[in-house]
Every structure is written in C-alpha cells, then in structure tokens.
Image (cartoon, helix red, strand yellow):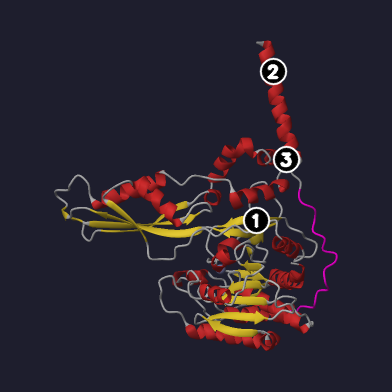
Amino acid sequence: MKRLLLALLALVTGLGGTMVSRAARLVPPLPVDTSGLPPMPSIDSAGAIQRLAGAIRYPTVSYASGAPIDTAAFRGFHDHLVASFPQAHATLTRELIGGLSLLYTWKGADAAAAPIVLMGHMDVVPVPEPNLPQWTHTPFSGTIADGFVWGRGTLDDKSTVLSSMEAVETLIRSGYVPPRTIYLTFGHDEEVGGRYGARAMVDTLVARGVKPGLVVDEGGFMASGLLPGLTQRVAIVGIAEKGYISLKLTSRADGGHSSMPPGRTSVGALARAIAALEASPFPMSLDGPTRGMLDAMGPYLPFSQKVVMANMWLTTPLVQRTLAANPLGGALMRTTTSPTMLTAGIKDNVLPPEATGVVNFRIRPGETSESVMARVRDVIADTMITVAPLDSAIANPSPVSSTRSPAWALMRKTISSMIPGEQPPVIPYLVMGGTDAKYWGPHSDAVYRFLPIPLGDGDRERVHGLNERVAARDYASAVTFFIRLLQGVGGL
Ligand SMILES: [Zn+2]
C-alpha cells in the first residue's frame, strides 16, 4: 500500500514538474527590431483631425430595413475626399464601383509584384431617434472637443478611410513611390453586408487578375483587459471571420377555435423546436484561430494561467468551461445559436395555422452553412417544422490566414511601430461579426482585420452605440500605422 502511495506521489510530482516546466517555456517572441525604419514624414495632425471631423458630417447611413440611403450624403463624402487629399487625387486613379463605392489605384514601380489592398467603408449604422438626447454631441456634427472627434463613424469606419488616405497624401508629398501597386477600396454598404460595394470591387479586381499579397480591413483592434489575467494592452488581428446564416423555422398545424385545441399546435411545436436548439448548442472546439489566440496570449499571462495554457493536452475541458462562462468566450469556440424573430397569431382565441421563427447562426471555421442546416434539422427532428435559409446574406466561414507569412510579419512590425515606445503583443483571433474582407477570402491567403486605433475603456460599446468618438492622439496612431505599412510593403 505504502509503495503504491509512493509511486502515485512520484507520478503526481513528475506530472506537476512537467506541467510547470512547459509553462516556464511559454515566453514572448523577441521584440520587433524597429531601428532600421525609414524616416517618418511629418504629419499634419491638426489638419488630419479637421478632415476626419468633416467626413463625419455626411450622414452616410445604411439601413438594415432596406430603406433608401441618402445618396447625396455619399456624394458629398466623395467630394470631401477629393477636396481633402489633392495629391492623392492627382496621383491615384479613382473609379466609382457598385454605384457609390470607391476604388483607388496607386500604381507601383514593379507592376509584376503582388499588390496590396487597403479596405475601409464609408457607410455607418443609424442612430435611433430616442437615443439622440444621450449623445454628448450630436452624432453627425463632427464636433471636436476635449481632445476627441465625436460622432457616428469616428471608430467604425470613417477613421480607416480618412487615415489611410491621409497616409497616402503624406507619402506622396514626401516623394514616396510605392514599390508595388496599392489599391484602396472604400465600400458604401458594409453595414448591410457589402453585397453591392465590396463584393463588386473584389469581383472587379479579380477579373483584372489581381491577386493581393496582403489585404487589410477593419475587425481587430488594440485594447487592454481582453482576458482575465492579461493586464497589458494587446493588438488583436483577425485572421478569419465567422460565417453567417439565418434559418426560418415554419411550423404548420390545423388552425381553428382555441376552445378545442388539437394535441399539437403550431405555436407549441415552434416553441419546442427553438427550445431544443438552445438546449443542444453546437460543439465547442479549441482549434484554429481560437487556439492560435490562446497560444499567443499565453506568454503574457500570470504563471498559474500559463500552467493551464501550456498544458492543453490536460486542461482543455477546464479552458473550455471557463471560456464558455461568458458569451464572448462561447462565441470564440462554437457556432452560436440566436433566436431573433417570432411571428404567429392574429387573435387571442384563434389557433394560428402557421408560426414562424428565425434563428441566426454565426458559423465557426470547420463548419459550413450546409452542416449547420443539417444539424438544425437533426436536433429539431419534427415533421411539423420546415427549416429553410432566410433570404439574407449567407456566408461560410472565411479561410484562415497564416501567422507565419511575410505578410503577417509586416503586420506585426507595423503594429509594433505605430505607437512610440510601445510594442503590444500581436495576437491572432477570430472575428465574430462580418466584414467586407470576407469577399477576399477565396482569392488571398493574407487577409488581416485590424482597426489601427487604440481603444480605451468603453470604446468597444461606442461602436454602433452611443457617443462614438476617437481621441486625436489615437487617430494619429492610425495615420502612422498606414504610413509604416506602406513604407514596409517593399519587404514582402
Ligand atoms: Zn465597420
């Protein structure tokens, strides 16, 4: 007995030792050498802020309801770009695509080198009327106050459009000629799926034989407090995005008078089907981009958490349980199930012959819209219910871009040089919403999603929310990011 206990003790000690030594090997990558960077041209920061503020004043709103957009606002925004960036408009060619989207081409010295695509979108989400009093400054005023530019689009995503153009203008003034061709594509309907803007621009470029060596769009960001234990500011860069499908469940039964209900009703069957879907969530998985994210964060965690992260062969169930405890963690690991709409009935004493519900799914890499639909039918398993895709955007998950490529190295180097004296850890991750970048998925293996603006407390809620704003200092970082990125594309 004693010998058995001793053996057990030795085993546990050995195991513990292995786990600790694995954790000790989790060290951050070497810092990026930014000593040999080209000189930074001087940026007109005060002017840049004014130009961004001016862009906010055009209510370029996209409506999910399909309500008509204010085309004059988009044309005004276009004119604002022309007036703001004269050098860029004298040097680059500009095409109107898909009605109101803009495609700029900046010819590079080497026409044979793989080009770069910088994406952004000009449209913004609406501001609901009842929320207006809660805005410190009216959302389309472009007010500059307290060190911020305020208004809808200051983070999502006019900041990207304006700061990338600011970088181009600045570089042209400094005499820079890009070593390879640069495309800038600014969509006009990203907030409603990009089906007319980004998709048309990607189709146009693909038809011209363009195969980008790097595509950069919004999606990731820089912030602190992203994971318990992770105290420092990190830059998360989307290397993939989830897919999207909404399924309409239709339940049919005999209608009639509510005084004599049949055994099963349309409403009851629909309710049961939705409850079954919620009770049987999609399986969790810690592979792909989510695993890449945890691996990359590991070295920056406290030692006790490192032990967990470095020993996933043993700790996967624990990590999954911990992550699944909050909605964000759950969404990183699985295809999500969200019932969003219900319709049935016209009168309290009439049994409706039909009840319908809509469930929205965000599909994780490894699954497809077809596999989601098949599983939903399996889980519901009810002949009273039919399942069909809703007539809205359906997208499979994007391919996963590499974190070992020269394009990734350029992203990391650029992020490491966008803020003086700070090299945030650069962490790959899975974007849970949709971006215009999804249309490049089939055509490029180097698609990265990153909004180069350091976000402060509460800023993530301001995106699509109240009091969206950007600090002048942080906006300057975005301009620096695009200048450094363009200066670096020769090394790809
Ligand atoms: Zn956006």
Residue 303 numbered mark, or none: 3
Q: Quadrant of residue 135?
A: bottom right
For marks 3 and 1, give the CA distance: 21 Å
Q: Nearer the viewer, residue 368 or 334?
A: 368
Residue 428 numbered mark, or none: 1
Q: Main secondary structure of the magenta part?
A: loop
Residue 39 left/right relative to 377: right
Start-end of magenta stretch: 28-44
Judging by the rendered image, the residue that carries numbered circle 2 is: 7
How many discs appear? 3
User: Which amino acid, by three-letter code, is at mark 2?
Assistant: Ala
Say if residue 123 shows up in the picture.
no
User: Which amino acid, by three-letter code, is at mark 1?
Assistant: Pro
User: What SS does tag 2 mark?
Assistant: helix
User: Which amino acid, by three-letter code, is at mark 3?
Assistant: Phe
* N-term mark: 2 or 3: 2
Q: Residues within 10 Å of mark 1 (few under 14, many from 20)?
A: many
Residue 337 vertical position relative to residue 198 in the rendered view, above or below: above
What residue lies at 80% left-to-right and 53% top-to-bottom?
Answer: 30
* N-term mark: 3 or 1: 3
Considering every residue shown, the one lying at the far top of the view is 1
Q: Residues within 10 Å of mark 3 (few under 14, many from 20)?
A: some
For marks 2 and 1, give the CA distance: 42 Å
Say if residue 434 shows up in the picture.
yes
Q: In which quarter of the image is residue 345?
A: bottom left
